Image (spheres, rainbow, N blue to C red):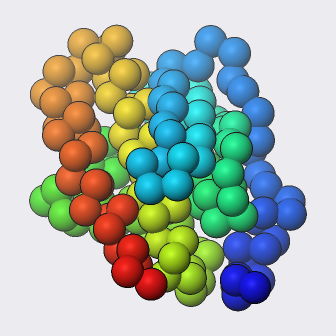
């Protein structure tokens, strides 16, 4: 049996922000390339701030817990602040929103949080393109392939 932290179990049993946002400003979807779990993310954005975030997911406990924690952490935050620093700093910051909250993630499940970050980057990229913010949308789009390195963590376990 896989040993999961209490935080993972808590967010899996009682996920926050499950659902859809009608006419969302940002929408992204992903099939996790490692396991096939699916997640769709909806963002309500006003004046560059994430006002609301919801998700739908068909996946394991860690996938659902990752999306639950992440949507809680990004609400009320200014989008531009997520993208300060180098590419590695941005990805690390986004990943830590999940991993610092969930505690120890079993090595065989380390591919779950990157999918949540990737679906966020995709939804933000779509929003920024619609808003005509091409410089920032190019940056967010360029981060998507970089997150793929994180899918390889724990793969050997």
Picture quadrant where residue 89 is located = bottom left
**Horizontal and vertical percent for residue 60?**
69, 59
Residue name at image x 62 percent, y 12 percent: 23
Image position of 96 with respect to 67: above or below: below
* Residue 112 appears left or right of 86: right
**Horizontal and vertical percent for residue 13?**
86, 63
* Residue 157 appears left or right of 72: left
* Residue 93 appears left or right of 55: left
Residue name at image x 69 percent, y 37 percent: 56
Q: Does any portion of residue 131 appear in the rendered image?
A: yes
Q: Quadrant of the N terminus?
A: bottom right
Q: Which of 58 and 45 is in front in this view?
A: 58
Image position of 72 with respect to 129: above or below: below
Q: Which of 149 and 23 is in front in this view?
A: 149
Residue name at image x 70 percent, y 44 percent: 58
* Residue 26 appears left or right of 2: left
**Horizontal and vertical percent for residue 22?**
69, 15
Q: Which of 39 and 55 is in front in this view?
A: 39
Query: As drawn, which residue projects farthest toward the right?
Result: 13
Query: As drawn, which residue projects farthest toward the front?
Result: 156
Residue name at image x 78 percent, y 63 percent: 12
């Amino acid at each position: 049996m896989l040993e999961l932290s209490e935080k993972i179990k808590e967010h899996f049993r009682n996920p926050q922000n499950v659902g859809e946002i009608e006419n969302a400003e940002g929408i992204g979807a992903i099939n996790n390339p490692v396991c096939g779990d699916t997640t769709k993310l909806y963002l309500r954005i006003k004046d560059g701030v994430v006002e609301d975030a919801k998700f739908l997911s068909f996946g394991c406990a860690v996938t659902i817990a990752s999306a639950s924690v992440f949507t809680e952490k990004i609400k009320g935050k200014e989008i531009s602040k997520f993208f300060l620093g180098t590419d590695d700093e941005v990805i690390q910051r986004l990943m830590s929103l999940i991993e610092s909250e969930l505690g120890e993630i079993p090595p065989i499940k380390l591919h779950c949080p990157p999918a949540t970050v990737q679906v966020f980057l995709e939804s933000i990229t779509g929003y920024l393109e619609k808003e005509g913010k091409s410089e920032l949308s190019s940056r967010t789009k360029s981060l998507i392939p970089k997150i793929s390195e994180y899918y390889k963590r724990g793969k050997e376990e």
